[in-house]
Each structure stands twice: as C-alpha cells, then as structure tokens.
Amino acid sequence: MSAYPGQDGLRTPLKVARSNGASGTGVRHWWIQRVTAVALIPLSIWFLFLMGGLLHATYPEVLAAIAQPVHAIFLIVLSVCLFWHGALGLQVIIEDYVHTRWLEVTLQIALRFGAVLAALACVMAVLSVWLTGTGYY
Amino acid sequence: MPNTRPTSPHLGIYRWRVNMLQSTLHRLTGLFLCLGALLVAWGLIAAASSGAAWDVFAAFCGSLIGMILLFLWTWSLLFHLCNGIYHLLHDIGQGYGPARRDREFAPVYWKAGWSMIVLSVVLTVLVWIFLVLHMAGGAA
C-alpha cells in the first residue's frame, strides 16, 4: 500500500521527484547530448565554410583568421561542444561493446581524461592565438 | 569470469529496415568524427605553436591520405548532421509511430531514411566541387 498520495510501490515521492532512475544520473546524458547536438548544427556548418575559406591560406593568414574575435569565440564554443558531444557518444559505444569490467572502467576514465584534455588544449590554443595576436614563426 | 547467462535474440531475428542502416552509419560516422575532432585539435595546437608545426599539419592535410581522410570526414560530418537533425525531429515526436516502421504501411518512412543517406552524399559532392573549383581558382 502507499503511504503518500501518488506513490508508486515502495518509491518515496522524493525519489520520484528527483527522477534519477536506476542509473542515479537521470536524463542528464540524454539532454546534454541533444543540447550539444543542436549547438553543433550551426557551428559545424560555419566550420565547413571557415575551412573552405582557409584552403590555401598561409600561416599568418590562418593566425589572422583564428584571431578574429567572432571566429575565436565560435572556435572555443565549437571545441567544447565537439568534445563533450563526442565523449557522450563514445561513452555509450564503450558501454555497449566492452564487456570486460576492468577494461570498460579503464576506457571510461581514459575517455574523460582525453576529452577534457583535448577540449582544454583547443581552448588554450585559440586563446593564445587570439590574445597574443601571433604564433611564434 | 565469463558471463554464462542467456542472451536475448539479436540482429538475425529482425526484418531489415532502413533505420538499421541509419543507426549503424550514425554510430560509425560518430566514431570516425571523434578522430576528426582530434585533427581539429592538432590544427589549432599547431597554429598556436609555430609556423613549422603548422607546415607539418598543412602537409598532412594536403597529402593523398590526408585528402582521402578529409573527404571521408566531410561525408561523415554531413551524414551525422542530416541524420542527427532527423534524430532530433524524432525526439520531439515527429515522424514516429508503430505503423511507420514498415515499408508496406509507411513508404515515406523508408524514403525519409534513404534520403538522409542520398542527401549527405549529394552535399559532400557539392562541397568538394566547390573546393576543387576554389583550388583551381587559387592556383590560376
């Protein structure tokens, strides 16, 4: 029987309200994957045009393109969304296909280190080109 | 310890539908695009490092293997983009329902699925035609 109105079985209303389910993380993975996907729609189309424009660019031209504030900001947002979205996808692939527990946990941790490291490196690279104006030729 | 529990029936028992191909390609292109993301990281770090580092990166992109990879990355990106938008439409409840799964009931579902693949190939060809024309213009 239920102790509270609207209670389902032994779950307390608090447990239902938190809606975290069995995984303990609820729908956060699903939502972040969708939100980064939506952000990546315009960003990836913009990125294709940027790459097309830089096809035969010299090194100083590339630096100048990255150092434009709008380009720099979009590149930073793109880097974060790209590696976040990619990490969420790879996480599911590892969950689906790696069934040896120690290897799965190792890969999941390595994936998180790698994604944060790569995103951070991209952001720092863009910032250094943007704020110093030049690379070191 | 090997898992000796019985497994559920897998791929072999299902009638083939176009969404199986879409799903497989979505995952494969996503995996491949993660490698592409590392190329983006390489390019940005090279640009921030030195002209010599950038030249190594540019030489890789301009090499035959680099061009083939860039072509495959272009298609992967465009397929993942088209099919991803299709996914998002499903997420808001569009084009989804029990009867839509089968060719006899909903041919439009099959058409929509195949058109994602065709559209991504067409867009890839268009992008590369533009790039080749751009290259030809740049060389002249």
Image (cartoon, rainbow, N blue to C red):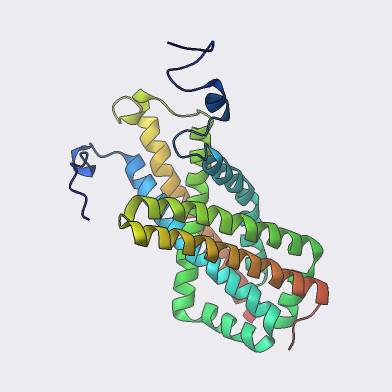
Q: Is residue A128 left or right of residue B65?
A: right
Q: Percent from the top left, x then y, of residue B1? A: 22, 56
The correct choice, above or below, for A88 with respect to B57 in the image is above
Residue in view at x 56 percent, y 42 percent: A34
Q: Which of B42 and A94 is in front in this view?
A: A94
Residue in view at x 45 percent, y 65 percent: B72
Count of picture labels: 0
Residue in view at x 42 percent, y 49 percent: B118
Residue A44 occupies quadrant: bottom right
The correct choice, above or below, for B19 with respect to B95 in the image is below
Q: Nearer the viewer, residue B49 or B3?
A: B3
Q: Is residue A54 left or right of residue B87?
A: right
Q: Percent from the top left, x then y, of residue B70? A: 50, 69
Residue in view at x 53 percent, y 27 percent: A15
Q: Percent from the top left, x then y, of residue A70? A: 78, 60
Q: Which of B50 and B118 is in front in this view?
A: B50
Q: Is residue A57 visible?
A: no
Q: Nearer the viewer, residue B37 or A106?
A: A106
Q: In this view, does B18 lie to the left or right of B138?
A: left
Q: In which quarter of the image is the N terminus of chain A?
A: top left
Q: Quadrant of the C terminus of chain A?
A: bottom right
Q: Can residue B35 be seen in this view?
A: yes
Q: Percent from the top left, x then y, of residue B116? A: 45, 45
